[in-house]
Structure formats: C-alpha cells, structure tokens
Image (tube, helix red, strand yellow):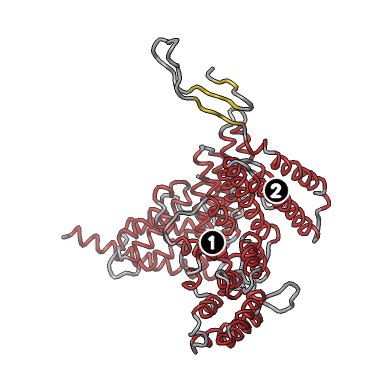
C-alpha cells in the first residue's frame, strides 16, 4: 500500500511511481498528497454543537408521544428555535476565534466555518417559517422580515457608527443607514434618523416631516391585530395612492435621496435595484419587494416572486450559488430538494440529519411523499436478494391518490417489467374511472392492463350509454382503438359499430350496410343489441337506391325472427320482454314491413340486371 501516517493526524499517499528500476539516489515519487481527517468533526467548537444538539435530538424523540393537538406545533417550533440557538452560539464563538486568530490560515479556516454556520442558520430559519410555523398570508411577511433582519445584520454596526458620531446627519454613511432601515421595513428607526436630518437642515425639514408621516401611517399587519387581510389591502392601497400623489406633485423633487426613499416605499423595482450594494443579496431584495408591493403575499405565490427576484437581482451577470438553490427550493416548498441540495453543499451530515428528523416529526416526510417513495425504488434495485420482492410490496402500499402519481408508479413498474403490478394498477384506475362515470379513461386503463373481462364490461357501459343518449362519448378514443380492439369481442364490436356510424355519416351506405350485416351474422354483436342494429338498418332499407341485396335482406329477416321467436337460440331475458313491450312490437312491425319492401325491390332490381 502507498499510504502511511505522517506527523499528527496526517495521512500521506504516494501518487506517482517510477516504472523504471529503482534508484537509490533518485526519489521514486516527487508528489505526496496530504489527507486530513474531517476538520469539522475534530473542531472543538463544532463538537460542542454536536453534543448540545444531541441533547435536543434525544429530548425530541422522548416527547414524541406528548406531541398532540394544538400544542404539537408550538412544541416543534420551540425545538426548532433551540436548534437555531445552538447554531448561533457556536457561530458567534467561532467568530470570536476568527478575530483572535494569530495566523492568517487559522483566521481563514474559522471565517469559513462562520460562513457555513451562518448559512445553516439562514436555511434552518426559513424552513422553520415555511414548513414548521406554516405562516399564512399576512404573518408570513412579518416572519420573513424578521428572518432578513436577523441574517442581514450589518445595519446594527452601521447604526452604531453613525449615531456615535458628533453630528450623525453629516456622517458619510447617514443616508446609507436611512436607506437600509427603509429596505428592512424598520420605519420607526428611519423616522428617527430623518428627524435628525430635519433638525440639522431646516430647508429639508418639511420634506422629512412628510416622508416621516408616510412611514408612520404605512399599514402593517402586527401580531395580535384583529384586522382582516381585506381591510389591510384597502388601507395599504389608500396609503400607496398618497405616496404616489406626493411623488407626482414633486414634493421631494429638490431632494433626490428623499425621492428615492419614497420610490422604494412604492415598491419601484428600478429604485430597489439601484440599492443592490445595500441589499447585498437577492432574498433581501425579495422581502423588501414583497413588503412594499405585495404585503399580503400568500405562501403559494412565494416561489413566483422568489424566482423573479433572483433573476432581476443577478441580472444574468452571474449564476446562482448553492445557497441560492437551497433557498429557492424552500420557497418552492420542495422539501426533498432542500434536503438534497443541503446534502451536496454542506461539509457534514449534521445539518441534514437533524433538519430531516425535525421535519419528519412535523409529519412532512410521510411514506406517501411524492418524491421520497421514488427514492426507495432505487435502493430496492440495488438489493441483490430480496430487492425485487420488497419493491413489489413497496409498490402495493403506495396510495394512488392522483392520476399523475399513478403514471409515475406505472412507469416504474413497466421499466422493471413488473407485469402483474402494471395490470393491477391499471385495473384499480379503471375501476375508479368507472365509478366516476369516466368511461373513456376506464377503457384506456383496461386496454393498458390487457384485461379482456374489464374491457368487455366498459364496452357494455359504452353501448348502454349510447342506447340511452343516442350518441357516443369519447369518440377520439373509440376512433383510434386500432389493434387494441382485438382485446375482447365486445371491444371489437364497439370499434366496428362506431365505424358503421362513421361510414353512414360519410354516406358510404353500401359499406355501412355490409358492416352492419357482418356484425349480426358473425355473432360478435351481443344479442341484446340486435334490435338496435336492426333499427339502424331502417334508414338504409328506406333509401331510394337499393342498398341491401335480396340475400342480405333474407339474413336480416332471419336475425329478426331469431330475436322475436318464442325459442331464442340462447336463453335471453330480453326475448320475453320484446314480446310484451308495445314499443318494441311497433319497431318489429316497422322492420318487417321495411324488409319486405326492400326484398321486393332487391328481387326486381337483381332480375332486371340478369335480364339485361
């Protein structure tokens, strides 16, 4: 082996070998790779994180049975906050080590760990808001504002610098501070800063007062407030109109900075993008944009605004970072993708393991999850002995609650040639479709299942539906059955009977008559449907031109007599019903008359042709 332990916890590996004979003077390998043990695991600060989070994890497992009713959500939110507090404490301790580091390499290493921990808390906090708190429209924006304020914290140090100076309004960062406060929705603090500007500059005092009043009167849904979202929307629209009026009247025209602040409060995207440096990232831009343009945003719409904000902020100049992809997956409420992206991007499994466990306790990762059940399939594929059997049992337990999900399961079964499972799934879906009176869908699934008996059942339903309504539903499906119609005799009859109607509609009466007669004489038509077929023959019998020949007419007469005779060829309850039913009796008399007339015309016509 080419491995050997070096100094400390270092593993060295020779990576290039001399193919020639060894020389005592020349080194065999000019390159040595150094492999360190996992730095995260052996960092004493992160070990503290692991130990403290272990206590939270074990405590959560122990109280699982107590997590019931309305208190369940509150307890899970509290657990989530405990995890976040441990992450933040370690991050702050790591930050102090980075500042105190004596050599640059250690400083960079600590700073890198601070960045990773900061990203962890950022992601966890967002997941807490969206998946655990499940904040509705209104409170959702308040949570997102707190999220941004917590993780974009440069404003606090900037505020300390400005307010600590002799003349804050003259400080070089004064307007940057005011702008950042407005961008974060901290309007009370922004008003206080504007009052300092008004005191120092009497010429702009009036404008500062007006803008301060607009900040004071901006409607915001505060916790515990009983006003509805509709009331908030109405107040917000009126407030927005007042802001627009001041802007159009040129109230702030002599002060570009105040005018820019007013545009920001109107949600002007161009004005917001001018503050890219102060916003620092796209999700800060997103929350500010929502605050001033869509304060009652619904969770379902978040992904749309998130994606557009990311695109606008990056402007095609750069590609999204791994952190951006994780946050975007969260805004799309794609828990599986969040876990997957975190697994790829983060340097250890602590975060993914604990977040997944918490989400599982929130019952967000159940076995029927649209994504996670698919992951299990791949694992079963690589189990050499019992994988196939286990997969079959796994497939049987997946609830087919949507057609989209059923198609996914079906595709998995077809790819693995699981014939019985394919047939079973198709039959289940066919039965559901029949119960919902969706005959076209039911027929499609029965054909896909290659279930002749069920295809016959559905075909009978189609024929019964035709008798009641006088027309076919799902014509496209029946017209394009193709070879599938050979699955059962009844399905074949359905396809051919539809073809008869098409030929009749195209006025190809000769072809239509031949097809109609063949359906009856070949015994492919159900006996209960013969009267319908004979009734369909009436318009052809009454045509000016002779359509049925004498021989064909005799065949139709025989079919009619078989149907109406007291001793039918097969025991059929419809025979007695036909004898007693006046309407059917009338139809029979009309058919006999039409057949007799057609026979006479056919004999005359055929005799004339022979004579000529």
Choose the circle earlier in sequence order: 1 or 2: 2
* Percent x, y of residue 560: 45, 59
Q: Residue at x 47, y 69 (%)?
A: 274
Q: Nearest to the eye among marks 1 and 2: give it.
A: 2
The quarter in which the N terminus is drawn is top right
* Percent x, y of residue 39: 63, 36
Residue furthest to the left: 612
* Percent x, y of residue 489: 47, 48
Residue furthest to the right: 66
* Percent x, y of residue 369: 63, 50
Quadrant location of residue 334? bottom right
Q: Which mark is residue 468?
A: none
The quarter in which the C terminus is drawn is bottom left
Q: Which mark is residue 93?
A: 2
Q: How many marks?
A: 2
Report helix, strand or loop for mark 1.
loop
Q: Which residue is mark 1?
A: 280
Q: Residue at x 77, y 56 (%)?
A: 78
């Amino acid at each position: 082996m080419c491995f050997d332990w070096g100094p400390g916890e270092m593993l060295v590996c020779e990576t290039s070998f001399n193919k020639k004979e060894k020389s005592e003077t020349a080194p065999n390998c000019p390159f040595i790779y150094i492999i360190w043990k996992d730095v995260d695991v052996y960092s004493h600060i992160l070990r503290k994180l692991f130990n403290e989070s272990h206590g939270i994890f074990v405590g959560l497992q122990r109280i699982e049975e107590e997590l019931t009713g309305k208190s369940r959500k509150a307890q899970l939110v509290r657990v989530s906050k405990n995890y976040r507090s441990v992450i933040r404490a370690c991050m702050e301790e790591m930050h102090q080590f980075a500042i105190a580091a004596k050599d640059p390499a250690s400083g960079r290493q600590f700073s890198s760990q601070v960045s990773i921990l900061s990203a962890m808390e950022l992601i966890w906090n967002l997941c807490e808001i969206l998946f655990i708190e499940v904040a509705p429209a209104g409170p959702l924006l308040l949570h997102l504002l707190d999220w941004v304020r917590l993780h974009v914290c440069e404003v606090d140090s900037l505020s300390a610098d400005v307010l600590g100076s002799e003349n804050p309004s003259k400080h070089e960062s004064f307007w940057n501070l005011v702008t950042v406060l407005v961008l974060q929705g901290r309007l009370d603090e922004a008003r206080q800063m504007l009052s300092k500007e008004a005191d120092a500059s009497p010429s702009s005092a009036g404008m500062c007062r007006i803008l301060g009043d607009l900040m004071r009167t901006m409607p915001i849904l505060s916790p515990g407030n009983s006003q509805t979202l509709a009331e908030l929307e109405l107040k917000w629209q009126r407030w927005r109109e007042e802001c627009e009026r001041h802007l159009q009247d040129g109230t702030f025209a002599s002060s570009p900075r105040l005018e820019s602040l007013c545009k920001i409060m109107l949600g002007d995207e161009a004005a917001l993008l001018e503050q890219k440096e102060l916003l620092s990232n796209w999700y800060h831009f997103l929350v500010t944009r929502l605050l001033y343009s869509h304060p009652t945003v619904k969770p379902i719409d978040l992904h749309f605004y998130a994606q557009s904000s990311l695109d606008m902020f990056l402007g095609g100049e750069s590609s999204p970072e791994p952190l951006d992809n994780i946050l975007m997956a969260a805004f799309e409420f794609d828990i599986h993708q969040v876990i997957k992206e975190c697994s790829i991007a983060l340097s250890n499994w602590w975060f993914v393991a604990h977040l997944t466990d918490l989400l599982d306790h929130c019952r967000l990762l159940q076995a029927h999850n649209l994504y996670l059940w698919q992951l299990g399939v791949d694992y079963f594929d690589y189990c050499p002995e019992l994988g196939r059997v286990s997969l079959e049992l796994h497939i049987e337990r997946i609830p087919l609650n949507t057609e989209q999900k059923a198609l996914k399961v079906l595709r998995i079964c077809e790819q693995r040639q699981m014939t019985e499972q394919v047939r079973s799934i198709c039959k289940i879906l066919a039965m559901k479709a029949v119960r919902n009176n969706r005959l076209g869908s039911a027929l499609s699934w029965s054909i896909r299942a290659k279930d002749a008996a069920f295809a016959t059942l559905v075909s009978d339903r189609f024929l019964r539906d035709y008798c009641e309504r006088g027309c076919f539903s799902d014509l496209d499906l029946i017209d394009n059955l193709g070879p599938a119609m050979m699955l059962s005799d009844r399905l074949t009859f359905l396809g051919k009977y539809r073809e008869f109607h098409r030929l009749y509609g195209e006025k190809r009466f000769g072809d239509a008559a031949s097809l109609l007669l063949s359906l009856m004489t070949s015994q492919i038509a159900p006996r209960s449907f013969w009267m319908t077929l004979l009734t369909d023959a009436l318009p052809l019998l009454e045509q000016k031109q002779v359509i049925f020949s004498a021989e064909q007419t005799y065949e139709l007469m025989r079919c009619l007599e078989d149907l109406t005779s007291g001793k039918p060829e097969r025991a059929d309850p419809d025979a007695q019903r036909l004898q007693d039913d006046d309407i059917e009796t009338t139809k029979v008399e009309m058919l006999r008359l039409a057949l007799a007339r057609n026979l006479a015309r056919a004999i005359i016509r055929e005799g004339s042709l022979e004579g000529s």
